[in-house]
Each structure stands twice: as structure tokens, then as C-alpha cells.
Amino acid sequence: MSATPADFAAKSEKSSGKKGKGGGGGGGQSRHQGKAAGRARVQFDDPSRVARAAKAQITSRSIQQSDVPFLQHLPQYEGNTSISRGSGFGTGQVHPAIQALGVKYAQGVITGGHSRCLAFVDAMEEVFGDFVMTDGSNAQLIHRESSKLLNRCVQFVVECRPLSVSMGNFVRYLKEQIAHLPLVLSLPEARKLILEAIDLFREKRLLLPVKEIADIGSKLIGQGENVVVYGYSEVVLNLLKKARKIGTDFLVI
């Protein structure tokens, strides 16, 4: 009986409690996640940390000359599109879809946690759809190279803009799926399971929850009520549209 992405997801949840105990591969994966999280939380008012982060940086971005003093702990770059220079797919192993996405993140073209995560999931689906190996395709190489590919894409995206919470959840989920791939798979079989796992995350963790929130939340708004919102949320916007669609008359403040 063949395994499915849902089977791998179940195994991932069962093994998640073992990571904190320093056991085997789980502990190693937690350490790698900690390093990735550290890159995302670099304090840019600490020269030593900035210098260490710059050595591992794969993007090319110009530091903003006139920075804002009370935001010195955050990265402040010039508004240019040179971030993809030197990180081409053929040389730096960053897929063109990730390069294009990183530019959009940096320029603020794609904003909002849900929209950014959905775009990232779509880009990673394209990345693994093009995933090939020229030096053999045994199981250990597939695990190693797919993990390296994911980590490099994540690093590039983080350097363009730190991950949102949902993006971090997706990265952890995808790492778990890769770690639990059977060791008897060929490259096409492994690629197929990874793509199915990505599609499963998109449907069950991103699209379905938004629909459920809109369906349930829209029924909680009564006729003639005032709804106070703060900031912008695509999920809330869908909820309000759903409420109006079912005939509820309300005012948004």
C-alpha cells in the first residue's frame, strides 16, 4: 500500500514531540530551524551580528543611506531591484520563481501574511516541479539535495523580507514531509509526493480555513451593525464580502 502526503503529515505530528529531546534527526532539524530563525531575527543595530549575517548573505542589496534612527534594529535597504544579482538558478541555485517573489516582497508588491504565504507556496511548488539532480538519484541524495534547495530558497526570501507566521509554518511542514519520505523512492516519485504535500498544505491550511472563517464569521454580523476594523486583512475582507453577499446590511468603520 503506497504512502500519501497525509500519512507523512501524521508521522510528522507524532514525531514533533521528540525534537526537544535531542533525538537523532529530529534534534538536528530543530537546530537547523533555529539557525534559520536566527537569520530572520538579526538585530541590525548590533555590528557583530550584522557582519556575520553579511558573510552568509546571498542577495545583493544596498543599505539605505538615510536610515530612521528608532528603526535601526531593523533592516533598511534602498528601494532597488538588485537583490537577485549573483543568485541565479544556474549558479547560486535560487530558482527564478523565488527570485521574482523576493523582489515583490522587498518592493511591497505582495503584502499581508496570507497573500505572502500563498505566493510562497505557489513558488515552492514551481521550484520542486523543476527539481532535478545530475549526480545520481539515490534516496539519501534526494533527501539531502531537496533539503538544501528548500533552505536556500528560504534564506533568499528571508533576506528580502522576514517570514510571516504562516510562511514559517509552511517551511516546517515541508521540511517534515521531506524528512519522512520513504528511502526507496526514485526522484520522480519523491518529487510527486512533495508536490502533493505542497498542494495539501495550500488546500487545508490556507484556502479552506479562509473559506470557513468567511462562512462562519459572516453569519455573526447582524443587520444594521457597525463593524470596526484595524489595518488590512485579506481574511477579514473575504468575511465582510461574504456577509454582504448573503444580504447583510452593515457599516464598516
Image (tube, rainbow, N blue to C red):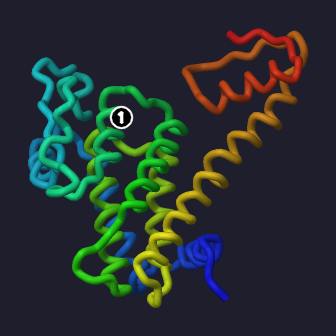
Residue placed at 57% from the left, 65% from the top?
A: 196
The kind of secondary structure element at disc 1 is helix
Residue nearest the viewer, comparing 246 with 219: 246
The kind of residue tagged 1 is: Tyr
Residue placed at 74% from the left, 22% from the top?
A: 241
Q: Position of residue 180 (x, y in %)?
A: 50, 79
Residue nearest the viewer, comparing 57 with 14: 57
Q: Is residue 220 above or below residue 130?
A: above
Q: Is residue 45 above or below residue 42?
A: above
**Left or right: 70, with 60 as reference point:** right
Residue placed at 59% from the left, 20% from the top?
A: 230
Q: Is residue 217 above or below residue 192?
A: above
User: Which of the 4 image quarters holds residue 217?
Assistant: top right
**Left or right: 238, with 223 as reference point:** left
Q: Position of residue 70 (x, y in %)?
A: 25, 23
**Left or right: 159, with 97 as reference point:** left
**Left or right: 179, with 98 as reference point:** right
Residue placed at 53% from the left, 73% from the top?
A: 16
The answer to whether any part of residue 19 appears in the image is: no
Which residue matches tag 1? 105
Q: Position of residue 155 (x, y in %)?
A: 28, 53
The answer to whether any part of residue 197 appears in the image is: yes
Q: Position of residue 157 (x, y in %)?
A: 32, 46
Placement of the N terminus among the 4 image quadrants: bottom right
Placement of the C terminus among the 4 image quadrants: top right
User: Which of the 4 image quarters holds residue 233?
Assistant: top right
